Image (tube, rainbow, N blue to C red):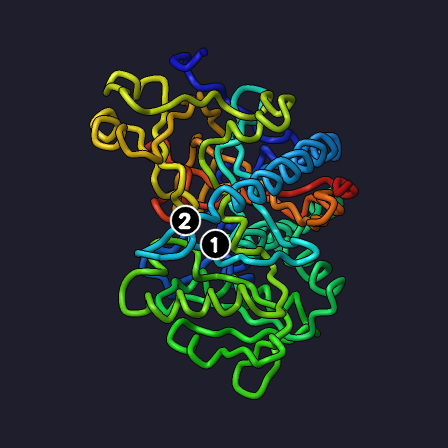
Amino acid sequence: MTLLKPADLEPADPRVAWLSEEDAGRRGRFHAAAIRHRAYEPRDSEPCDISMVPRVVTARQARSLEGIVGRIIQASIDFALDSREAHHGDGGNCEGYSLGWIAGQTRRLPDQLLGNARFDFLPQGNDLKLLEAGWVNLSAVDYAPQAALALLDSVPDLAAEFDVLRPATRMKARLEEQGVRRLAILVKDDHSPYAENDWELIREVLAPIESVVISERDFGELHCDQAGRVWFGGAGIDGIYLRALDGPAAFAGHHALRNRETLAMLLGAEVIFLDHPLLLLAEDKDLSFLTDRDPGLAEVVPAMRPARGASAADAEEWVLKLRDRHSGEGVFFDGCDFEEHRDDPSAILQERLRANHFPVNTLHGHRGTAITDLAVHVSYRYDVATRTVLTAEIAGYFSRFTREGLRVNLCTGGGIVPVLTERGAQP
């Protein structure tokens, strides 16, 4: 492993590289457009920064990615279904939060699993390496693409060559295929302005499908009749989209009991999930399950090894992750954290990657280079009986930068890099 070499500088596409040059007027126009598009939120005490230098996904890159992500979809859902069977024996009780409990509550499966998965890749040299995957309650689904739309708005000449993909358009297609007319979006009581912008943008795209936002405090108003139909007040609910009920925090605190009861009720109802909670099992941070099922995925999956017995010195070449934590949680880079968590039953070590640096020129005035990632949204349909992927199409992209440390996560600082696609780049 070439882990200690200097990071590679990944240049911006020549057609947009000039956006790294300082121009106060352009910055002002971009700032105003980002507010209009709800990509930049002045209500936030610490608004999320945005770079004006976009990533460009070419048609050739998109074709290559689509082949890879389709295979990841197949291997991941197969793994989740196999894991459900393995977990069934420990699904009777729920103390706090347990993936086994969710598996146990999923007593029957729908004919099809459908939704929007996101695969977070880290560019390393000329390659992409998969860091982790998200399957339930993904953040920034539609507000992140607004940064790219704001860029096209403020630099209109770019629109001749480039487009922006919005994952919500494919979410709408999946729901229409299932005949969903009214979707309940379940959200947390405590949420950021960005999260609110995100689901409101999604609701606008989903129209004329009606969508109802239901906060945790109102989950008790959801009920199921004897026929298995879900109701909220007097309105029948055809589909469920979870922006809550996704991890330990959802099953602790004053909403814990109601949240568990709500999820158990929904899992037993005649309702369609967009992003079925069983697929939290596919968020396992030990990505070796992918290469176990598809050895060819070794080209994008980093090396993994058990964490037991790891020392602080191993932090130079490895990252410690807790397998069952949702999203960017449970990831440790420092040697002292290794010694604290190495004996956790869910701990795993992932190869420490040598991340590229990419040019940034941000609204907050930061110019230079930063570590960035490239996340790929994939809209999927999977037939449970035949274990066949029916649809796996790239629905959009998401890129983040971090100026400090190694964690590329909006919750821990950094900001958004707009992602543009070549016109015709969607396979």
The single residue placed furthest to the front in the displayed view is 89
Q: Is residue 342 above or below residue 87?
A: above
- Amino acid residing under circle 1: Gly
Spatial separation of the CA atoms under disc 2 and disc 1: 7 Å
The label shown at residue 407 is none
Residue beneath label 2, please?
90
Q: Is residue 341 above or below residue 295?
A: below
The single residue placed furthest to the bottom in the displayed view is 234
Identify the secondary structure beneath mark 1: helix
> How far from the left and from the top, in percent, is residue 298?
58, 21
Residue beneath label 1, please?
104
Label 1: few (<14), some (14–19) or many (≥20) C-alpha neighbours in 10 Å: many
Which quarter of the picture shows residue 169? bottom right
- Observer able to see residue 107: yes
Identify the secondary structure beneath mark 2: helix
Dot 2 or dot 1: first in sequence order is 2
Q: Are marks 2 and 1 in contact (CB under 8 Å)?
A: yes
User: Relative to 406, is 165 on the left or the right?
Assistant: right
Residue drawn 30% across and 23% down? 308
Residue drawn 26% across and 29% down? 343
> How far from the left and from the top, in percent, is residue 415?
43, 45
> How far from the left and from the top, in percent, is residue 339?
21, 26
User: Relative to 321, is 372 on the left or the right?
Assistant: right
Q: Is residue 172 above or below residue 82?
A: below
- Amino acid residing under circle 2: Asp
